[in-house]
Image: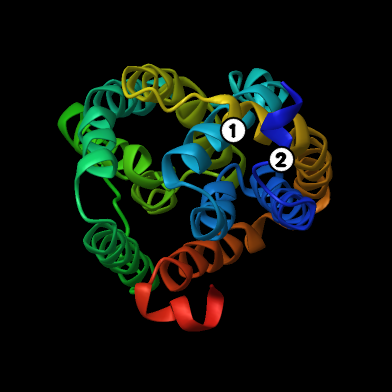
Amino acid sequence: MFDLFATTSAGTMAFLCAVLFIAGCVRGFAGFGAGMIYMPVATALLYPPTAAAGFLVLDFVVAMPLVIKALRLCDWRTIIPAVVASMIFVHVGTWLIATLDVLMLRWLIFAIVAGVLVLLVSGWRYHRQPSTPVSFGVGAVAGVLGGVSQVAGPPVVAFWLSSAKEPAIVRANLIVFFAVSSIGTVFAYWLRDFFTLDVARLLVTGIPAYGLGLFLGSTGFRTADPKFYRVIAYSLIAIAAVTSMPAMDGLLR
């Protein structure tokens, strides 16, 4: 059992824990974004399926207190179709990460995330009451991205940010969506044998750092000015776009 701690250096694990702490602060405040912060770094240092599976379980366990509180605020009419689609299409993303060229996948993720950001910054808003097909389509895109990279946030974030909902409701929608849809991702990863002893190591070392960050971020949201929520959300999507670019490997990795 102790051999599983020998496959990665102590310095690398300490660095990953520091990144997890920052990712936890972001997740606690915004309701999303931890995968955008953590996954580009983790996949540069670890086997991508190990990084994705480890973070999936870590976020599901540690973020559960946030989920319980968000259940009272979220809008189930838009969440349920998105979750169903995500659970179906996460298998497509899991197949992609297991079989296709990683470089091509990363450029595809960058194109999607950057396109979403441009759409939001342009001022576009979805003013209608979201229909079931629209919610389903957004969830499908999120499921594919989540299966590939654990960066499912941009499509659903753009979807709910483009509405007139209050930041607290948008945040609650995101927290509940990611929690429920991750159940389907766990099943998809289990079918691909992604859960290994290396994943167990990530959980043992990462839970304290991520949990502390989550607590501090959640505390910050309760005291922050709501008008800054969308600005921070846009900034997180921009970070996801930049850090996922293969062209930035020479600088970031």
- Amino acid carrying mark 1 in the image: Asp
Left or right position of 121 against 95: right
The quadrant in which residue 98 appears is top left
158 lies above or below 241: above
- At horizontal 47% and vertical 63% (from top left) the residue drawn is 240
Secondary element under disc 2, as helix, strand or loop, is loop
Callout 2–callout 1 Cβ contact below 8 Å: no
- x%, y% of residue 63? 67, 29
**Tally of numbered tags:** 2
- x%, y% of residue 110? 32, 65
47 lies above or below 252: above
Q: Nearer the viewer, residue 89 or 186?
A: 186
- At horizontal 41% and vertical 68% (from top left) the residue drawn is 241
The quadrant in which residue 91 appears is top left
Secondary element under disc 1, as helix, strand or loop, is helix
Residue 129 in sight from this viewpoint: no
Q: Which residue is mark 2?
A: 6
Q: Which residue is mark 1?
A: 198
- At horizontal 47% and vertical 46% (from top left) the residue drawn is 47
Distance between the alpha carbons at the discs numbered 2 and 1: 10 Å
The quadrant in which residue 231 appears is bottom right
Kindly report which numbered mark, 2 or 1, lies closer to the viewer in this rendering: 2
Q: Considering only order in the chain, which callout, 1 or 2, is on the residue closer to the N terminus? A: 2
Quadrant location of the N terminus in the rendered image: top right
Q: Nearer the viewer, residue 137 or 90?
A: 90
170 lies above or below 101: above
Mark number, residue 224: none
Residue 122 in sight from this viewpoint: yes
- Amino acid carrying mark 2 in the image: Ala
